[in-house]
Amino acid sequence: MRDIAVFSGSAHLDLAREVCAHLGVPLSPTRISRFANDCLGVQLQANCRERDVFLIQPLVRPVQEHLVELLLMCDAARGASAARITVVMPHYSYARSDKKDAPRISIGGRLVADLLVAAGASRVLAMTLHSPQVHGFFSVPVDHLNALRELAAHFRRYDLTHTTVVSPDLGNAKEAAAFARLIGTQVAAGAKQRFADDRVSISSVIGNVADRDVIVLDDEIAKGSTVLELLDRLRESGVRSVRVACTHGLFAAGALKRLSEQPDVLEIVCTNTVPVPVDGERTDKLRVLSIAPALAEAVRRIHNGESVSALFEQS
């Protein structure tokens, strides 16, 4: 592919290398330095002039460091006369700050979107945003992918005759219903109320889950409190087995260990939008699916001016 340059920040180099391998282009080097006063500096060490530049950087821990890296990468590409700058952001962590649900609260999802555009982003390629309205926070075009095809291909290997896909809450029910259609199963949802970032209550499960194999599907798992609460309701309903799936496996604060210790959880499936846990936190129940081929195909289509939505019409 000519006239394309792909760079990565430090957030997820393995994913960036894998995307470039599928594209058949080199991952151009990026130099990230720190001044004596603790400020970050970024240098893109390949020609950007009149090229289609793609910057790969999920916003993962430490989120603020990686955000500033990404902003500086955008600014460097713009200053180097890039023809177009596409931010490839597999995980947009600020998408959780998407509404004013308390007095005098910030809406970080919109603010960070504005910052990226101000820094020079011409386009955004994202994966499974936390809520649909976040798409509209950006004043530049956004290609919003999901990982339902990759997850569906994995679960189709099992006997799904008596399976129900369960969304932990009604907000994710539409995505769960789409996933259930892909694999030909029923769908159910939890009635959830959130009291704090890590404290939730699920009063009941709406749908048929008794004596059925359940796939719990969420967009991301951070501390795992929602999934653990849902497991209690599913047990009360008499489910037969449980598998847990998500796009963004953040697994903060020992969440992966807590989930894997649940005896009725047979499997935990996520994608590599964010770095997978280090070996000391891994478990035999964890399966990590790669979304690099999907990202690479979307990058190719953006570069060639082809339809990205057609990717989902092929599902």
Image (tube, rainbow, N blue to C red):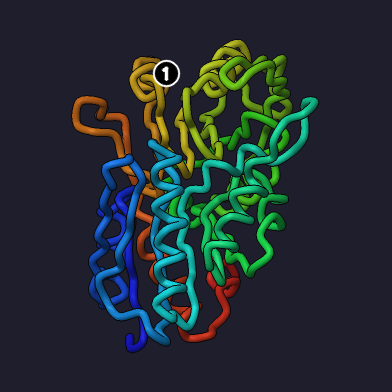
Quarter in which the N terminus is drawn: bottom left
Residue 85 or residue 90, whichever sits in front = 85
Secondary-structure class at tag 1: loop
| Relative to 313, residue 173 above or below | above
Residue 252, quarter of the rendered image: top left
| Relative to 220, residue 212 above or below | above
Q: What residue do we see at 56% from left, 27% from top?
A: 212
| Three-letter residue code for mark 1 | Asp
Q: Position of residue 213 (x, y in %)?
A: 51, 30
- Circle 1 is placed at which residue position? 264
Residue 68 or residue 37, whichever sits in front = 37
Q: Position of residue 147 (x, y in %)?
A: 49, 53
Q: Position of residue 135 (x, y in %)?
A: 66, 56
Q: What residue do we see at 34% from left, 49% from top?
A: 40
Q: Position of residue 128 (x, y in %)?
A: 55, 50
Quarter in which the C terminus is drawn: bottom right
Q: What residue do we see at 55% from left, 37% from top?
A: 217
Please indicate, yes or no, whether residue 52 appears anywhere in the rendered image. yes
